[in-house]
Image (cartoon, rainbow, N blue to C red):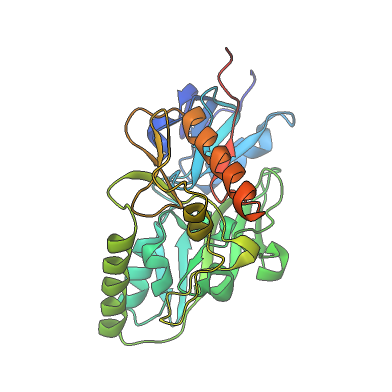
Amino acid sequence: MTDLPVVRGRLTQARPLNDLTWLRVGGPADYLFQPADIEDLQGFLKGLPGDVLVFPMGVGSNLIVRDGGLRAVVIRLGRGFNGIEVDGNIVTAGAAALDAHVARKAADAGVDLTFLRTIPGSVGGAVRMNAGCYGSYTADVLRKATIVTRQGEVVDLSPEELNFRYRQSDLPEGAVLISASFEGPVGDPEKLHARMAAQLQKRDETQPTKDRSAGSTFRNPAGYSSTGRADDVHDLKAWKVIDNAGMRGATLGGAQMSPKHSNFLINTGTATAADLEGLGEEVRKKVYETSGITLEWEIMRVGDPLKE
């Protein structure tokens, strides 16, 4: 890959991605670009040859990069893209801002975005994946998302243009999300912080938060989602059908389905991307055999397998 644009940020060739994902696996990207600011990102995308693939990457909390790496320029936003501003009950955050930080800063200002507190990852990923929990979704509160297109133009997108669905949205090919604005209900800061503390405690009790995981591995069948309510039923939750298939605690190489929460795929320390993806596929096969349900991956898998 030659003739890449001159940048002010950092452009690194053959950059391993394993240390940039929560699961700590993944081969090298052809290039990793960390832009200095929006103008640097615009210039880079505009000047990039049209046949070069672009892969925007957040904090890697919901991602398996295969062991052979990624034939693309990975764009990772850092400082300069993580600001959070509150104006009334509108919260505008850079795509690199962590969901937890946005929830806390919003609560300080009396804006209820508490559902974001326990979502691992950044704002860009939350918008891209329509992240949600406790019955609330990004789509419910998003007012606009700002992107830089593959042609280097800054464009605002409405929720309708993003076409939100369960754990999905539509972004133009090669576009990089740089910020989002949310409108949350007004709330009492003290009560909002108390609610988030309770949510965190519940998460730590029920999920393997001390292990290397990427959050939920599979989508809940048929779009059923945990609401966190007392009357919540678990007949069609991913963890339940995985349990029924006898795959809680199952292992492959260094990969394991967490004994604490069977819909969490964890790296016990020595897993390769192939171990993790392979175990996930074994789980899907067993669940289909026992229940007739085809689980869909929630974790994004990208890149090439390692050539033998």
Tell me if residue 119 comes above or below residue 173 in the rendering. Answer: below
Residue 176, visible in the rendered structure: no
On the image, the x and y values in percent for residue 277 come to 53, 35
Count up the numbered dots.
0
Residue under the point 58% across and 31% down: 73
The one nearer the camera, 18 or 207, is 207
Q: Residue at x 67, y 50 (%)?
A: 153
The quarter of the picture where residue 193 lies is bottom left
Front-most of residues 130 and 255: 255
Q: Quadrant of the N terminus?
A: top right
Q: Report the side of 204 relative to 77 (left or right).
A: left
**As rendered, which of 174 and 303 lies closer to the eye?**
303
Q: Vertical placement of 75 versus 176: above or below?
A: above
The picture places residue 53, in percent across and down from the top left corner, at 67, 33
Vertical placement of 77 versus 69: above or below?
below
Task: From the top left corner, tell me how far across and down residue 64 is, in percent.
Answer: 51, 38
Q: Residue at the far top: name it.
A: 308
Q: Is residue 6 above or below residue 204?
A: above
In the foreground, 224 or 59: 224
227 left or right of 258?
Answer: right
Q: Answer yes or no: is residue 205 visible.
A: yes
Residue 308, percent across and down?
57, 12
